[in-house]
Amino acid sequence: MRGDLPAQRSFDADAYWAGVDEHDRLCRSLVAHLAGSGVAAGSGLAGVNVDLAWRDVDGHQFIAEVKSVAAGNEVEQLRLGLGVLPREVG
């Protein structure tokens, strides 16, 4: 049985680039926060293709997928972020 298809969304280039800028700002903020604790973080570290990855002093690996949400896209953004785990960590 097929459900209703989602409504087609229009593309807003200004909103897209604002989202890209905010994503980059959030990544830089997290890198700076971790650096304040002596932890080096960056994209693609430790061979993992995610927004940010780092290891703590005990060698435990962490990853971060930065997602911005707006009204109506919360579930989609969570799916995108969580979908990275099986591909990159599994």
Image (tube, rainbow, N blue to C red):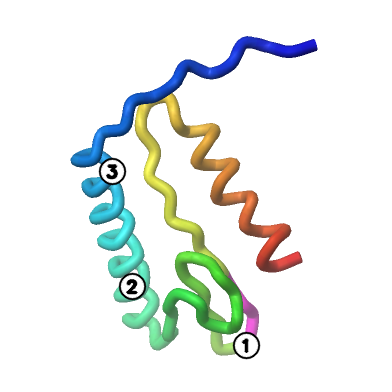
Residue plotted at (19% across, 40% down): 14
Question: In the rendering, which numbered label is found on residue 58?
Answer: 1
- Residue type at mark 1: give it: Asp
How many callouts does the rendering have? 3
In the image, residue 42 above or below residue 75: below
Q: Which element carries disc 2, helix, strand or loop? A: helix
Please tell me whether residue 86 belongs to the stretch shown in magenta.
no
With 17 as the anchor, is 66 left or right in this view?
A: right
Q: Residue at x 43, y 84 (%)?
A: 39
Residue 29, given in percent of the width and then of the height, sits at 29, 66
Q: Nearer the viewer, residue 52 or 37?
A: 52
Q: Which residue is the site of mark 2?
A: 33
**Residue 68 point in image, percent of width and height:** 38, 45
Q: Residues within 10 Å of mark 2 (few under 14, many from 20)?
A: some
Mark 2 vs 3: CB contact within 8 A: no
11 above or below 6? below
Q: What secondary structure characterizes most of the magenta part?
A: loop
Residue at point 45%, 75% (across, down): 43
Circle 3 crowding by C-alpha within 10 Å: few under 14, some 14–19, many from 20? few
In whole angstroms, how far apart are the C-alphas of marks 1 and 2?
18 Å
